[in-house]
Amino acid sequence: MMKNASAAECIRACVKNGSDLALLSGDKLYPPQGRQVLFDKWAGQTVTVQGKVSGTTITVDAMTEK
C-alpha cells in the first residue's frame, strides 16, 4: 500500500509495475479478461460487472457503479 494514495492510485501503480488485476467477489478472486480501459476507470471501486464466467476467469463486457 502506498502512503497517502487512494485505492485506485495504488492499484494503478501496482499494475504499472507488473502486478496483475483481479476482481473480488465474496471471498473469490477472478482474473479479468476484456476491456482494459474499464479496469483502469473502475480501479478500487465497488462495481457491478456484466460478462461471462468461465472456470476462474471473468470476461468483462461492462462495468457500472454499484
Image: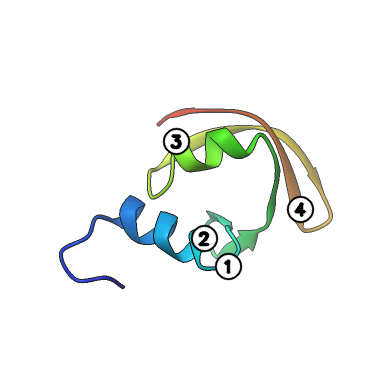
Label drawn at residue 15: 2
Q: Residues within 10 Å of mark 2 (few under 14, many from 20)?
A: few
Left-right relation of 31 to 24: right
Q: Residue furthest front?
A: 17
Residue 3's spot in the image, x, y percent? 19, 71
Q: Earlier in the sequence, mark 4 or mark 3?
A: 3
Where does the N terminus fall, quadrant-wise? bottom left
Dot 2: element: helix
Q: Give the alpha-carbon distance from disc 4 to disc 2, as whole Å.
A: 18 Å
Camera-side residue of 50 and 19: 19
**Type of amino acid under label 3:** Lys
Compute the Cα span from label 4 to label 3: 20 Å
Distance of label 4 from label 1 (alpha carbons):
19 Å
Q: Earlier in the sequence, mark 4 or mark 1?
A: 1
Q: Which label belongs to residue 41?
A: 3
Of marks 4 and 1, the one in the foreground: 1
Report, in whole angstroms, how far the alpha carbon at label 2 lies from the one at label 3.
13 Å
* Horizontal and vertical percent position of residue 17: 51, 67
The answer to the question of whether label 2 and label 3 lie on touching residues, with beta carbons closer than 8 A, is: no
Do the numbered discs 4 and 3 sit on residues whose CB atoms are within 8 Å?
Answer: no
| Marks 2 & 1, CB-CB < 8 Å contact | yes
Residue in the image at 27% along x and 70% along y: 2
Q: Is residue 51 left or right of residue 37?
A: right
2 or 3: tag closer to the N-terminus = 2
Q: Which residue is mark 1?
A: 18
- Coordinates of residue 59 in the picture (x, y in percent): 75, 40
Dot in front, 1 or 3: 1
Mark sitting earlier along the chain (1/3): 1
* Left or right of residue 23, residue 54 in this image: right
Q: Nearer the viewer, mark 4 or mark 3?
A: 3
Which label sits on residue 57? 4
Q: Amino acid at mark 4?
A: Thr
